Image (spheres, rainbow, N blue to C red):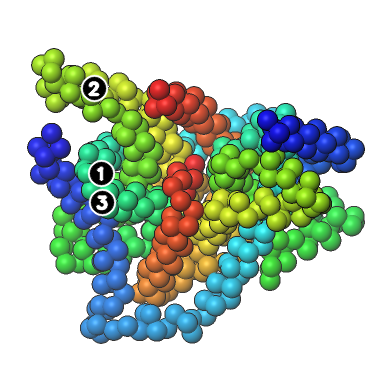
Amino acid sequence: MTATLTRADVASAASQKRRRRAPGWLAVVPLLAFTAVAFGLPAIAMLNGAFTVKDPASGVSSYTARNLSDSLQGPYLTALVGSVKLSALSALIAAVLGLPLAQAVVSSRSRALREAVLTASGVLANFGGVPLAFAFVATLGNAGVLTVHLHLTDHGWNLYSFWGLVLVYLYFLIPLMVLTITPALDGLRAQWREAALNNGATGVQYWRFVALPVLAPSLLGGLVLLFGSAFAAYATAAAMVGSAVPLVTLQIADAISGNVLVGQENVALALSLDMVLVAGVVMAVYLPLQRRSARWLDA
Amino acid sequence: MARRLTPWRWAVLGLAALYFLVPLGASVVFTVDVPGQGVTFDAYSQILSADGFLSSLVLSLELAVATIAAVLLLMVPALVALRLSAPKLRPVVEIVCSLPLVVPPIAFVAGIATVLKWGPDYLSRTPLFETFVAIQNPTFPVVLVLAYVVMALPFVYRALDAGLRAIDVRTLVEAARSCGANWPQALVRAVLPNLRGALLNAAFLTLALVLGEFTVARLLGYEPFAVWIYNVGGSQAQMSVAVSVLSLLVTWALLLALAGAGGRDRTASSRG
């Protein structure tokens, strides 16, 4: 009793003191001011640029939707569709392969195996970019160790292609899937399986009618997360295929570094806006799914 | 039941091990078994003396230190204050810190490049122009630190929020205050020690992000470590793969240290 009283006293005394002092939101102001400048300015510049055209003769800028419609035509549309196709396929394959891997880890009773695979997944999911591309070039590129020793080129193998990129993206997408789906698999109760089997269900039926429906929100959420991760990836593709595979990230990079016609910078900004919209849809789908699966697992 | 699954499980794990280990093994073979020269370790011994290796690595480390300091200085007081006295701002901060997830780095750098062009275009007669020049100083590009802090916000927010959720900040601060500590003392001596794990977690994630960052640095024309590896790849294939393998090992060591020090929250280490 005394203890609670003292704590309440202290609390009220402290809050009185706090009221006289600078309010707490002052500590939040630097963070908000910083993001307004470092994130808000580029975002506004992108929006503004995506909707303006500068007349090269008079130098006058005017607002228009032409950049956006240009960004959805010709080579830009090809690149956008290429990126969506690559990300969707890699995400789907990674989900299909990551689920059994996660299940193999969860169903094993070995703690060491579980810890090792989850730690490795945490590391590999972060392993992207230039080193990953170079590791695969050294393995399966034109002069790669496996390519040379197994004469893969004779069989039509080419790493610098759409499917080559899929193979490389899986290297960080599968671990990401394992990390995302493992908590959901942990949430599957052994009793559900036993109940299904006692009622005469086969293993396949258990998965089809019990496990997969329960896992569906987490699986979908993971898929969407993987898609977003692959969609935003630039370094791996740039270091590996150059521009052999049309991708929206490579197009934007080319336009920014002035590798294409002058005056295309604003189309690059429109393409960036397209990417932000796709990523926004991804997050809008992912967050409710994540909340839903979290509710299932807490129950 | 688990016993019946065993062969299936081993097949899955074996295939996964094959897929994930072969590229690493092959990369090592690629660097030491040079066609026409036999087995040689030149690729590794030449790294230290290679042009630009040390300067790019030092630049990356400096950027990492500056980014970690900046992001923690911005986030820790803000998140502690949210817990203590401004809970209404919490959704705002959460959204602000999640927004960078919606903007892919390539789109972000497109925006930054546009803003930087305003300097010469519109501001050349104003004092702001000096600022624009200063933050683009090639020996230490502050603009990269600004970009990296923004990109680190979602991960740092998640790491620190998890840490703060685990402790009773209000009681800690009130105890420290009633013992006569002033606000900075309460924060530094009572709250921060209890956040050690979360702070380490946030710092490691930011370090890994900055050391591996390629997109923003390359498109703004700077040469930190990842961009250097890329540039070297064109002329010296063996050495670029050797450096890739080494940088991979260093990143792994860092993240394994994180897994050991930071505890269980592995999802924070996945990129969102």
In the rendered view, does B144 fall on the left or right side of A88? right
Residue A168 in view in this figure: no
Tag shown at residue B186: none
To which chain does the residue with label 1 belong? A
**Residue type at numbered disc 3:** Leu
Q: Position of residue B103 (x, y in %)?
A: 58, 40
Say whether disc 3 or disc 2 marks the residue closer to the N-terminus. 3
Rendered-image quadrant of the N terminus of chain A: top right
Which type of secondary structure does the marked residue at label 2 adopt? Answer: helix
Q: Position of residue A27 (x, y in %)?
A: 78, 44
The lab-note entry on whether marks 3 and 2 share a chain reads yes
**Residue type at numbered disc 1:** Val
- Disc 3, disc 2: CB below 8 Å? no
Marks 1 and 2, Cα distance to the nearest angstrom?
A: 19 Å
Q: Which residue is mark 3?
A: A113
Give the answer, above or below, for where B86 lies relative to A159. above
**Residue type at numbered disc 2:** Trp
To which chain does the residue with label 2 belong? A
Tag shown at residue A105: 1
Marks 1 and 3, Cα distance to the nearest angstrom?
A: 7 Å
Rendered-image quadrant of the C terminus of chain A: top left
Q: Residue at x 52, y 80 (%)?
A: B51
Q: Position of residue A164 (x, y in %)?
A: 30, 50
Q: Which residue is mark 2?
A: A192
Q: Residue at x 86, y 39 (%)?
A: A17
In the rendered view, does A7 fall on the left or right side of A68? right
